[in-house]
Image (tube, grey):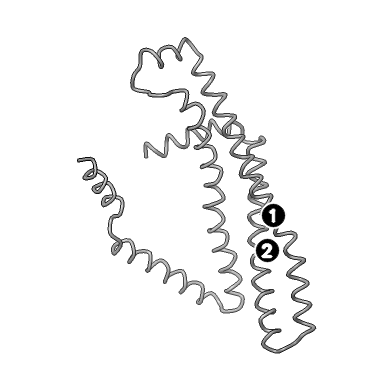
Amino acid sequence: MSFLRKVFKLIKIAIPKLIGKETISIVVLSALLVLRTYLSIWVSDLKGSWVRAIVKRDLPSFINKMILMVIYSFPSAVVNSGLTYYNNILGVYFRQNLTLYFQKEYLKSMCFYQITNLDTRIANPDQIFSSDIELWSNAVANLYSNVSKPLLDLILMARKLAETMGYQGPTLMMLWYFFCSIVLKYVTPPFGDLISTQQSKNLF
């Protein structure tokens, strides 16, 4: 809980206003994620009809599907480029807000002198205010896409499967994945503990 409180405190600094350039970028990024998922579904349907045309040896249908595939590649490229751009620009906005806030606090009441000369608990404060802020901002900006995209794919593709197979098929599939994840959690050895033990032994 302490970790989450610290994360939310930093997010409040990174997004200072409810309606601002940061939230607008998040809204645009969300729209691009939805569009990318729909494009993926359309391409999957097109690939299925393409395979059916090959099996049926229907040359006109095959050529038609191939042309549609080429047409779909242009909006897909634009959407992918837009996702990369808005992920990067969101990271820049987060970094800018955090840097301005910490620089203001760093220069207040000779705080920089106390940190660099009197308080030995914080090593390399300059690195924290530069590279660490950049890494955190980029990680949080990418985290939104990395979390929301799989959830969105799961919801929309389950809905698409339900149209053809009924809701029983997607429900059983999700239950199967959930069961497998539980089994893997208890079967998989603790690799983190093993690596830390190995590293501690290599020191001696």
The residue depicted at 38 percent of the width and 68 percent of the height is 180
User: Farthest residue in the bottom direction?
Assistant: 56
The residue depicted at 62 percent of the width and 42 percent of the height is 88
Residue 39, which numbered label?
2
Q: Position of residue 37 (x, y in %)?
A: 63, 61
Label 1 and label 2: CA atoms lie apart by: 9 Å
Residue 100, which numbered label?
none
Residue 79, which numbered label?
1
The residue nearer to you, when weighing 138 against 168, is 138
Q: Is residue 150 above or below residue 111?
A: below
The residue depicted at 64 percent of the width and 71 percent of the height is 44
Residue 154 sits in which quadrant?
A: bottom right
Q: Is residue 144 above or below residue 49?
A: above
Q: Position of residue 91 (x, y in %)?
A: 58, 38
The residue depicted at 33 percent of the width and 61 percent of the height is 185
Instruction: Tell me whether circle 1 and circle 2 mark residues in contact (CB < 8 Å).
Output: yes
Q: Residues within 10 Å of mark 2 (few under 14, many from 20)?
A: some
User: Farthest residue in the left direction?
Assistant: 204
